[in-house]
Image (cartoon, helix red, strand yellow):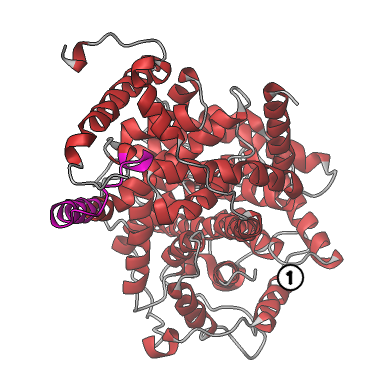
Amino acid sequence: MSSDEAHLEEWAWLARAADGDDASFHLLVERYQGRLLNYFLRAGAKEHAEDLVQETFIRLYRHRSRAKPLARFTTYAHTLAHHVWIDHLRKHGRALRTQEAVRAHTDTEDQRSSRTAPARLDAERLLDALSPDLRDTVVLVVYQGLTHPEAAEALGIPEGTVKSRIFHAMQRMRALLDEQPHARPHEPHG
Amino acid sequence: MNPTDERIPDRPESDPRFGPVLETLRAWPDAPAPALAGVIAARIARERLRRRHAALALAAGAMALLGTGAWLLLRAPQEAEVASASSELEAVVPAPEPTIIPVETAAAPTPEAPDELARAREWLLRHQDDAGGWTMGRSGASANYTVGTSALAMLALANGERSAELQEALDRAARFLARTQQPSGVFGPDITGSLYNHALACLALLRARPGGDAECERALRRGLDLLANAQRPEGGWTYLRSRGAPNTSLTVWALLVLMRAEEAGYHDYRPALDSGLAWLQDVIDEKGRAGYRRPGDHPHGSETLTAAAALCFLDHPDALDPRLRLMIENIRTDLHAAAGPLDLYRTFFQTAALRAEPEPDAELARVATRLRAVQDQHGDDAGSWPPLDRWSSAGGRVYSTALALLALNGG
């Protein structure tokens, strides 16, 4: 099945769900639960990721009669997921910022106090260095495979802004990678 | 070169300069797919239940507004423009002696009592007129609102399991409502508060939907058209006779009808629905309180309008977040603080909103206990609720019984 056929099929499932066919909605859940979980995890949701996946499907269910197949279904699904994520950030923003501050402080202390603890610089650390806007854009394009126009639609921003966000995010993450040797002078080798 | 001076490539994520970044990012493996289908199916089942209750309770609360409108007409028929229906009533109508349920009694949740609900439904069925409607003669309420009261009784009954007898009663009631339609398309008499009658009748017809009854379908379509055409240029609704500014009280009503109409397959009213929701958004302040005509416009409190407006956004949470969360919290706080006399009118909006929450709310159990404590247990009116709040004296026992049924999820 081609990608286009898959998306037509998904819209058809949603239409059937709107007519009361729960089994069709179940198919959508089965197909998208993994993708959406990874979206939220990489966007930074961590322990709330599964809850947010659920919330996204609940919103999809609420909108099932009104959704119009004007784009690929995956774009629509990610639009809802993005809204869920933004709502979560608004609701828990203060707590999240506190957690990040604690984590940053702890990491710095670890690096100062231990010559053996390797500073973990991986994908998550790179993404953590980005603002929520930049991170969300990177996740949608790099991980979720949305095109720039699709990401623009999901995020509600111009396509050019998607491009510039990706560019600036890449710059920032590259700078972090470039700084890494200096940030980990005592990491044991071999 | 300053990084910010670099030219932005068309696809920055594929630019070779960022190869190591991309490589690092892609080293993050996919997490395995969770098994959420069962959990989500259960949540959807609860969602369906909540939506049904929310719609019905909205109707109930609006009926209380209807009762308010009746009082206002009786007391001040010269007023063509009624401000906040509930709040103005407080100003002009002396409230009856309140029925106070001790908080201690209300605090402990009680199990469902289906027999009590069944008795209430039976009481309503017994008091249906031969013509199909419910008159309120015994309670002295205004005949101007027989249409609205009958529609409310229909909504309360339609939520129960439909026996053949019940369906026949609903069909008769629907035909009664259809016969009350004026040449203009409005259900019920041409009075200042006719929009309350009209909206309730539309809701009841949408809910009952007697199969294949062309007369009722035509009446409903005309009624929906009238409602959509009555929308003010600003996006909200006001009294049918008025050309004044929209108000939240009537806009909530119109939106509820149009939302249920769309769910029922009437898709022509989407533009009216969208502009109405947009208007409603604009009267909600940043603290999650709905104003009567504008944010902060609370001539006599904001509790009822806040709960009513929140109900309109339950199906459209994206439109209002994060204010919707604040509204829900306000409703919970307001309901918790309402430890004095029962106010069915306000409580129905509030309980409907809380029912939309994912987890059961302790306030709902308190309300249920308080309501059951005042249900009549003996005599001819056993199973019904007396007109015990300040508004139900206008709507009578049919009104209070229907509201109580809806509030208890068992109507």
Mark 1: amino acid: Leu
The chain carrying label 1 is B
Most extreme residue toward the front, as rendered? Answer: A190
The residue at the point 21 percent across, 52 percent down is A107
Q: With respect to residue A3, does A50 lie above or below?
A: below
Mark 1 sits on what residue? B125
Q: Residue furthest left?
A: A112
Which residue extends farthest top? Answer: B7
Where are the magenta residues, as a range? A100-125
Does residue A171 appear left or right of residue B166 in this picture?
Answer: left
Instruction: Determine the secondary structure under disc 1.
Output: helix
Judge whether residue A111 is colored magenta. Answer: yes
| Residue at point 43%, 89% (across, down) | B105
Q: Nearer the viewer, residue B208 or B311?
A: B311
Q: How many marks?
A: 1
Query: Residue A113 appears at what percent x and percent y?
Result: 14, 57
Q: Residue at x 60, y 34 (%)?
A: A66
Q: Residues within 10 Å of mark 1 (few under 14, many from 20)?
A: some
The spot of residue A135 in percent (x, y) is: 35, 34
The residue nearer to you, when weighing B402 against B326, is B326
